[in-house]
Amino acid sequence: MKKSALQKARAAYQPKLPNVLTGSVKAVAGKPTQSVANQEEIKALFPSTYGLPELKFEKNSTPSTSSPVNVGVILSGGQAPGGHNVISGLFDGIKKIHPDSRLFGFIMGPGGLVDHNYMELTSAIIDEYRNTGGFDIIGSGRTKLEKKEQFDKGLEILKALNISALVIIGGDDSNTNAAVLAEYYKNINAGVQVIGCPKTIDGDLKNDLIETSFGFDTATKVYSEVIGNIQRDCNSAKKYWHFIKLMGRSASHIALECALQCQPNVCIISEEVEAHNLTLDDVVNNLANVVASRAAEGNNYGTVLIPEGLIEFIPAMKNLIAELNDLLAAKADEFAAVHHSEQRKYVIEHLSEANATTYASLPEGVARQLTLDRDPHGNVQVSLIETEKLLSEMVAKRLATMKKEGKYNGKFAALHHFFGYEGRCADPSNFDADYCYALGFNAACLIQSGVTGYMSSVRNLVKPSSQWLCGGIPITMMMNMERRHGEMKPVIQKALVRLDGEPFRKFASQRDDWALNTCYIYPGPIQYFGPAEICDQPSLTLQYESKN
Amino acid sequence: MKKSALQKARAAYQPKLPNVLTGSVKAVAGKPTQSVANQEEIKALFPSTYGLPELKFEKNSTPSTSSPVNVGVILSGGQAPGGHNVISGLFDGIKKIHPDSRLFGFIMGPGGLVDHNYMELTSAIIDEYRNTGGFDIIGSGRTKLEKKEQFDKGLEILKALNISALVIIGGDDSNTNAAVLAEYYKNINAGVQVIGCPKTIDGDLKNDLIETSFGFDTATKVYSEVIGNIQRDCNSAKKYWHFIKLMGRSASHIALECALQCQPNVCIISEEVEAHNLTLDDVVNNLANVVASRAAEGNNYGTVLIPEGLIEFIPAMKNLIAELNDLLAAKADEFAAVHHSEQRKYVIEHLSEANATTYASLPEGVARQLTLDRDPHGNVQVSLIETEKLLSEMVAKRLATMKKEGKYNGKFAALHHFFGYEGRCADPSNFDADYCYALGFNAACLIQSGVTGYMSSVRNLVKPSSQWLCGGIPITMMMNMERRHGEMKPVIQKALVRLDGEPFRKFASQRDDWALNTCYIYPGPIQYFGPAEICDQPSLTLQYESKN
């Protein structure tokens, strides 16, 4: 593997371990916990792992002696910067327990466990991946661990390899599955602990004890770098509106963090759109008004940040998509026979009045996308909708009307961007490198403590890493019941952007200024070697939340 | 202006000036020069500025005494990282000539000169922009300075401000205009020198004495950062082919440099496509063969770099576009009356056989784009064609055929990216910060030497900046005659990728390995504060070319 100069230099970086983990540790149990909602149902579903106490590690004056432990590790779901450091921290942690401990990686995600596809991760391999981005050390995958047969199949290989603990590095769904697996293994006395680690660039896996998921810091810094560069271009050429969509399945944390970093002219927050019950037209009109206000000052340029999940937060669009899914399922054959040029008319005639109006307001390309590109279950593929183009087209149309009414007299030319894959596998920032290493090392401490069904928790993250607090929280504590594919299921509650939270309030208090005036900030690329105020700052979301 | 931590730290960076410029300098004239081609025509068009000698600066033992000089500066054309440093170097250079020298910036490009739109650039303003990206200090524009009335109008304001020298920072077209302006002012004894500076991220403004244009280094490093990140994602998820288009009007230097940095599976070089007279089908088949070879090894993923200018280098496409332009101009009214659904058929029936075949092979979206989206002159807008989607669609079609023939048995899912605006206004790398500062400072030295029609030349760039060589080259030396809008014009010859040059040869010698195997390199973000091998390396193109 030929390496860049930066890769070589970063290999030598030694993540800063929290003080508490540097010596021998003891787990101190707090009070028993409750799930965030639906306590009775969750308790019934997790009889062996519900209500466990929070754990906090403290320094232990007497060194512990332990036997070697064999551990398995899985990377689950979308990539996030720092995954390799979770694994290297875990590796170093179990080697500290005993030098003969061994680490096995299951290949290409949870499927590797079921299919018995694995490799041993030796120090030679680990050393090649320290402080690097990506999940390529063992690959990742999206197989869901949900069924008893999968659990039993997995147990075969765990037993064969004498693995007594499994660490699942994943987002909310993967950690939900980790909890189910922990419960199952505990219940049948399988002798395998299951520990989760909070991963997702989306930033929606958090609570009081999980302050942030790893990868969010790095990904938002990469996006802010390119957004800042585009803003500087925008402010130099002064002739384009840049519509920038940002990855993030559902919550708008990424867009909000990038807005706080870069101060764009507009940033749409899906949670606010939903809370105010805005229609697509409302969103478009708000945008068009900002464009017109700036044009009145002679500024025919600007930047708009759009969260990827927006469409599903617009109640009218959500209703339309739900009815379209039903309609196209029920009338699949009839619709297939309708001529291409007549399809739009057909759909409008068969929808309820409110949804027909919404559908008729959509540009042709988007309307077609909604009826044609459906997933294997026949559902509309919302993620394929180019929201950034949809919005700019609708804004252009609205501005044309405003021009006729004498309310707008400017030029509007739009450019489009979508950032996602650029940030998921970036080299982790110093923050994520340290945080991930601590999460992995801390997972080893949880294993040593003998617990199962816990998520690795490292807190106090706005402080220097030496002062970080370490411990574990029962995954069931984060759960509630939600409808999935028509059934009520126990799942980890997603943390959406809170409109009463400090990050949003900070944004909301300044955005009118950012809209009319040009207040761009240019964060530049992630730095690894310079002064701490450049290299070691956590996300603004984390900084503002810690002030709450 | 609220600034990021990095902006604040970078403001303190002191660009490293070449030794020769640190004291008093004298200009040493070399031999008279010739234009690269069409010597007689160029000489006739530039009677006062043709054939001037190359100039090389040497240290002067006797300090020179000079009077204050008022200088104007213009940013012309697309942004490139480092423009602010050219201006700050120029500012420091004329202040060294005499502390009472003054610098005036013309606003929003050459149009500012003609419209008398300007501002004085004081040290307070300059200090706000040192080492930053963007052209926002005075803005840029694309007005072409070509006409006598513009030159005369410009002279009015130059005289009013007592400006005796004008520095035009631009690409090949802008420097061509600078040469014409220099000739005109010299010819009428206007008393205004004109000096050019070589700017363009495209990297196509270079020769033996201009080793690279500024901005190329930074822009390609930004693109390589995000390409590297995407490659790591690609190698982790192992399920997508990423088709990545890179900005660059015509030459493929950017794509080639990024390929050398990142080692993607495929990089298309337009100049090679043209040299081998490849059709669009050839390009598609080559791509499909790589996809199939990788699939045979179980690797259904990869990366493809595509230069923005590709389409115009495919002879068959160039012919098609030319005939389409003529056809749609001649039959504009008739075509407008053709029903939407019949347009494709109409076009095919009215094209010559070869072009009709090419047109018929295009996916529907692209075919429509070619006939609908035309510029104000009625011409097809090639830059709007989404080449990255065009290629992936055609590859998918080709693979479907290969599958039927039993020649391919894999999965093909494509994702698309276009990088351009992300890199044009990035904070300049240390290399570009130093190079640009030297170009600007050197321009001040050329002004002090009393010459006109010269381009600022800083060479020996692969060496430490202390050893860089400084001087000037007559712009006419870079010129030849080319057809523009139906007329033969003197223009600076574009430097395309040379297939016998070391950068291409290096690429060509390794690409078969990169295609089949996965040899990705992950360069990571530009670093400013770390070890020199990470922070101060010039582009690989420059490094390989210097070995020639």
Image: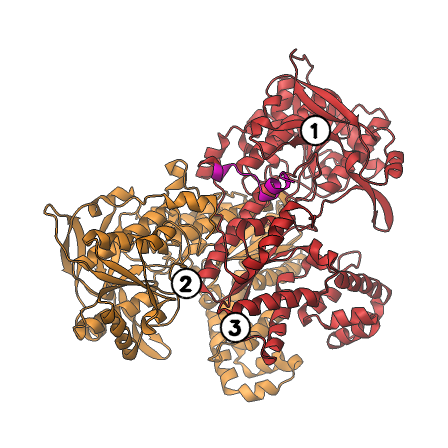
Chain colours: A red, B orange
Point 57% across, 25% down: residue: A123
Decide which of tag 3 and tag 1 comes sooner along the chain: 1
Residue depth check, mark 3 versus mark 2: number of the one nearer the observer: 3
Chain for disc number 2: B
Q: Pointer 3: residues within 10 angstroms few (<14), some, or many (20+)? A: some
* Viewer-side residue, A288 vs A216: A288
Magenta stretch bounds: A533-548
Q: Is residue B531 above or below residue B339?
A: above
Q: Is residue A240 left or right of residue B214?
A: right
- What residue is pinned by disc 1? A72
| Occupied quadrant, residue A116 | top right
Left/right of residue B339 with respect to residue A181 in the rendered view = left
Q: Position of residue A4 (x, y in %)?
A: 46, 39
Q: Which residue is the site of mark 3?
A: A411
- Residue occupied by mark 2: B78
**Residue B88 falls within the magenta-colored stretch:** no
Report the residue at 30% width, 51% height from top.
Answer: B437
Q: Name which residue type carries label 2.
A: Gly
